Image: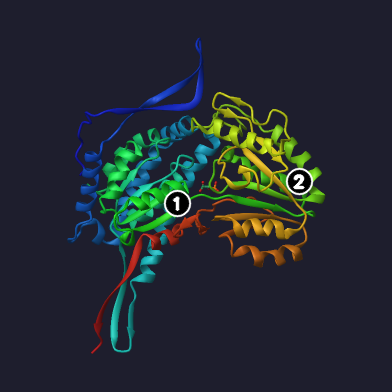
Amino acid sequence: DGQLRRWDGPFGEAFSPVLLKSAEGLLPHRLGRFPLLDAAAARSALDAAKKAYGQGRGRWPTMGVSERIAHVADFLARFRACRDEVVRLLMWEVGKSLTDSRKEFDRTAAYIVDTIEALKDLDRDSSRLVIREGVIGQTRRGPLGVVLCMGPFNYPLNETFTTLIPALIMGNTVVFKPPRLGVMLYQPLLKAFRDAFPPGVVNTVCGEGRTVVGPLMASGDIDVLAFIGSSQAADALKKAHPAPHRLRGVLGMGAKNPAIVLADADLELTVRECILGSLSFNGQRCTAIKIIFVQRPLLPAFLEAFGKAVAALHAGMPWEEGVFITPLPEPNKPAYLAELVADAEGLGARVINPGGGEICGSYFAPAVLSPVDSRMRLYHEEQFGPVVPIVPFDDIEEAIRYVVESNFGQQLSLFGSNPQTLSQLIDPLVNQVCRLNLNSQCQRGPDTFPFTGRKGSAEGTLSVSDALRAFSIRTLVAAKDE
Ligand code: G3H
């Protein structure tokens, strides 16, 4: 409600995945403390959001578009002023390289600018007078209500803001739960939220998901769930809502994006794109290439070149120049990845790059496994880490079958040098995913492009203009034209 209150309850501690050397060995570096709100505090955040959504002239949902834009622009200026601090926290808290942390910050700021511009266009387009068959009407876009907004640890800024900003600018009010790994980098932004928006419009709840988010969903007072994260977490959140038919979802969930490499693919280009696709930010991108199908005649050359390229990747501290492999922020991730590797090895695959899969503190040396097949967990599970399964194939139908039968449908990459073969493959593949990348890695950007998925990968479409539509509804004020 815009009032500052002291939190007298418990605090959680945030640690960096960057370990520090000490006499006792490698120790986690403590970044700070954050309030562990309880269910009652989360409820008061929800009440504030509901109150701010209340009707009345000049209130947030009915405020003129230009006024809401002014609030968002004010927030943007405050956000930009926090760049250095937020970038540093992003790097320390989730282990993202300095270069990528800066990119994430700048891309987020650009997204806010693009959203403001897109809203001006949408508003011009939406609020037209229409006269048809004796009825005169004016359409306008209105908000949907209270949005619960949650983003993931891997892009704690960008992925959160690509739902938070469109939700706000369309007149919704928001309860926002920062990711558990990424909560510290929001601390400098809390003041910016408070100063830029009217009371109750953005309400941040820090704490354990099951303590704060469970009761919010169970209350039935959340109108829209804006969630980017795992499919399992999205399902659990949706199930907690007592009236699922009233809940709208704007969801970005899991993916197991395949790359399909045809025998005539340009080896150098394919290896370069597959490295970026599968191992950027240690493979912790929902858009990462998570399995590579290679047509058998090219397999030996591909394995050799790919293995060499992986061996040349620089592992180091996130702030080092040219670093590619950095520590993993999820404490249980190295053990989980080791399990996947052991499972595949037990069924006949081998790690083709020497040292692949070795664990040192929070580092996991990238492991490339071949030949992987459908008996192995790596064939099915979304590893979300630096392990790359390679599946040899003879007939393209084998790779197509994987795409068709997958529970996910976000993106795929197709590599080959014969334009005719590529164009013949577009038809059977394009309706299985939402982005087909020809001779290039899978990726979300540019953020103005539509970003969504089929099957278990997404609900609703995010991009600048699609997101404005996803967080609003078109209504009509109509009268007889007499
Ligand atoms: O984790 C999902 C991110 O939106 C990925 O974005 O593909 O542009 O790195 P990106």
**Which quadrant: the N terminus?**
top left
- Disc 1 marks a residue whose amino acid type is Tyr
Residue at point 33% right, 80% down?
Answer: 130
Assess mark 2: CB under 8 A from ligand 1? no
For marks 2 and 1, give the CA distance. 33 Å
Q: Is residue 320 visible?
A: no
Image: 72 above or below 319: below
Residue at point 67% right, 31% down?
Answer: 356
Tag 1 or tag 2, which sits nearer the N-term?
Answer: 1
Q: Is 72 on the left-hand or right-hand side of 102?
A: left
Between marks 2 and 1 in the image, the one whose residue lies nearer the viewer = 2
Q: Is 79 on the left-hand or right-hand side of 333?
A: left
Q: Position of residue 451 (x, y in %)?
A: 50, 56
Q: Position of residue 354 (x, y in %)?
A: 73, 29
Report if the CB atoms under discs 2 and 1 are less than 8 Å apart. no
Residue at point 65% right, 46% down?
Answer: 375
Secondary element type, mark 1: helix
Q: Position of residue 35 (x, y in %)?
A: 29, 32
Residue 268: numbered disc = 2
Q: Nearer the viewer, residue 22 or 82?
A: 22
Image: 172 above or below 305: below
Q: Is residue 237 visible?
A: yes
What residue did someone put label 1 on? Answer: 111
- Disc 2 marks a residue whose amino acid type is Glu
Secondary element type, mark 2: helix
Q: Residue lying furthest top in this view?
A: 23
Q: Position of residue 235 (x, y in %)?
A: 41, 51
Residue 61, by quadrant, is: bottom left
